[in-house]
Image (spheres, helix red, strand yellow):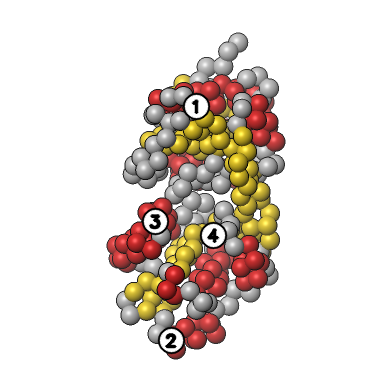
């Protein structure tokens, strides 16, 4: 019998058990992942798809890149696999995105609101599904893991050195968000501005900022998209080589340690040597990013 896939309203509470069963390496965060994905930023169009109690998918497209759509989530109950459920969900996802005018579908994170960079290589059924449906792998991304019980997270000496240079490092507050958003958009992009706001506003998250004479020099946040993840982090080009990144990283990881975490993931890592050298982080999760052209 053909799998029936229908559009549905976002309902994290109703979907949580299914996603928990389906995602062996992320199921313990299913509820919060669904909550985050359901709280889409402005300028994003989404479609939630449900195959009864057997599977769920989410697609999205940003107005600033309307030709590219993203498969943000696909979860198929292990008991329902090899019955065409995954294929039906992907076909429905492609149809929904085509309706948005999309020309390319990516199995990849859609910043600023995402829960993975791409497909974790350990999710072999998802990889097989993507490749069987004509998706090409075009990029690899990685997360690093920091052991919070053993990492050196001290910042006292560095903060004293920075203070002597007129730099103050402190936790960001809601009142500072307008200045932080404006700086982030000017120095980097609106994506990081949104993530900064999430890290400041969300319970259990946090953002630390380096200031000098009322000007933002650098920031680092954690918990913007996933509670146990660190990032993003950025330093204004004019303030580099001051050692700000090391201080901000360690302060964020200390927050996570103090909240009871023993490990933190550094998401979608760029400078691997920096994180390895600064907190002893190691590359652990590998993600493959896929894409395929479709006709709207």
Q: What residue is drawn where x is 59% and y is 37%?
A: 290
Q: What residue is drawn where x is 40% and y is 41%?
A: 65
Q: CA distance from mark 2 to mark 3?
A: 28 Å
Label 2 secondary element: loop
Looking at marks 4 and 2 on the same chain, the residue that comes earlier in the sequence is marked by 2
Q: CA distance from mark 2 to mark 1?
A: 54 Å
Label 4 secondary element: strand
- Check contact, mark 2 vs mark 3: CB within 8 A: no
Against 191, residue 262 (above or below) is: below
- Return the residue at label 3: 189
Pointer 2 local density, CA inside 10 Å: few below 14, some 14–19, many at least 20:
few
How far from the left and from the top, in percent, is residue 162? Answer: 47, 83
How far from the left and from the top, in percent, is residue 12? Answer: 47, 37
How far from the left and from the top, in percent, is residue 292? Answer: 55, 31
Q: CA distance from mark 1 to mark 4?
A: 34 Å
281 sits to left or right of 238: right
Q: What residue is drawn where x is 70% and y is 36%?
A: 124
Point out the frontmost of discs 4 and 2: 2
- Check contact, mark 1 vs mark 3: CB within 8 A: no
- Return the residue at label 2: 165
Q: Residue furthest top?
A: 1
- Return the residue at label 1: 294
Label 3 secondary element: loop
- Return the residue at label 4: 230
Looking at marks 1 and 3 on the same chain, the residue that comes earlier in the sequence is marked by 3
Pointer 4 local density, CA inside 10 Å: few below 14, some 14–19, many at least 20:
many
- Check contact, mark 2 vs mark 1: CB within 8 A: no
Q: CA distance from mark 1 to mark 3?
A: 28 Å
Looking at marks 3 and 4 on the same chain, the residue that comes earlier in the sequence is marked by 3
Point out the frontmost of discs 2 and 1: 1
How far from the left and from the top, in percent, is residue 120? Answer: 64, 43
25 sits to left or right of 9: right
């Amino acid at each position: 019998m053909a799998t029936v896939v229908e559009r549905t309203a976002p309902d994290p509470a109703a979907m949580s058990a299914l996603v928990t069963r389906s995602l062996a390496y992320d199921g313990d965060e299913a509820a919060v992942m669904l909550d985050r994905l359901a709280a889409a930023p402005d300028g994003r169009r989404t479609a939630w798809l449900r195959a009864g109690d057997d599977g769920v998918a989410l697609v999205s497209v940003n107005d600033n890149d309307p030709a590219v759509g993203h498969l943000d989530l696909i979860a198929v109950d292990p008991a329902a696999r090899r019955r065409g459920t995954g294929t039906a969900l992907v076909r429905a996802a492609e149809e929904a995105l085509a309706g948005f005018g999309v020309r390319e579908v990516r199995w990849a994170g859609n910043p600023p609101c995402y829960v993975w960079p791409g497909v974790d290589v350990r999710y072999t059924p998802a990889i097989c599904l993507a490749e069987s449906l004509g998706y090409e792998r075009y990029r690899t991304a990685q997360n690093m893991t920091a052991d919070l019980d053993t990492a050196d997270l001290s910042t006292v000496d560095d903060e004293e050195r920075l203070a002597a240079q007129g730099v103050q490092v402190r936790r960001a507050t809601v009142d500072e968000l307008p200045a932080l958003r404006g700086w982030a958009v000017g120095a980097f992009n609106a994506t990081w501005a949104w993530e900064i706001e999430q890290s400041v506003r969300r319970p259990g998250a946090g953002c630390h900022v380096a200031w000098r004479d009322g000007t933002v020099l650098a920031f680092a946040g954690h918990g913007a998209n996933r509670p146990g993840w660190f990032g993003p982090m950025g330093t204004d080009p004019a303030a580099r080589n001051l050692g700000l990144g090391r201080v901000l990283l360690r302060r964020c990881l200390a927050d996570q340690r103090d909240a009871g975490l023993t490990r933190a993931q550094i998401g979608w890592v760029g400078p691997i040597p920096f994180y390895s050298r600064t907190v002893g982080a190691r590359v652990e999760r590998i993600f493959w990013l896929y894409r395929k052209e479709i006709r709207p």
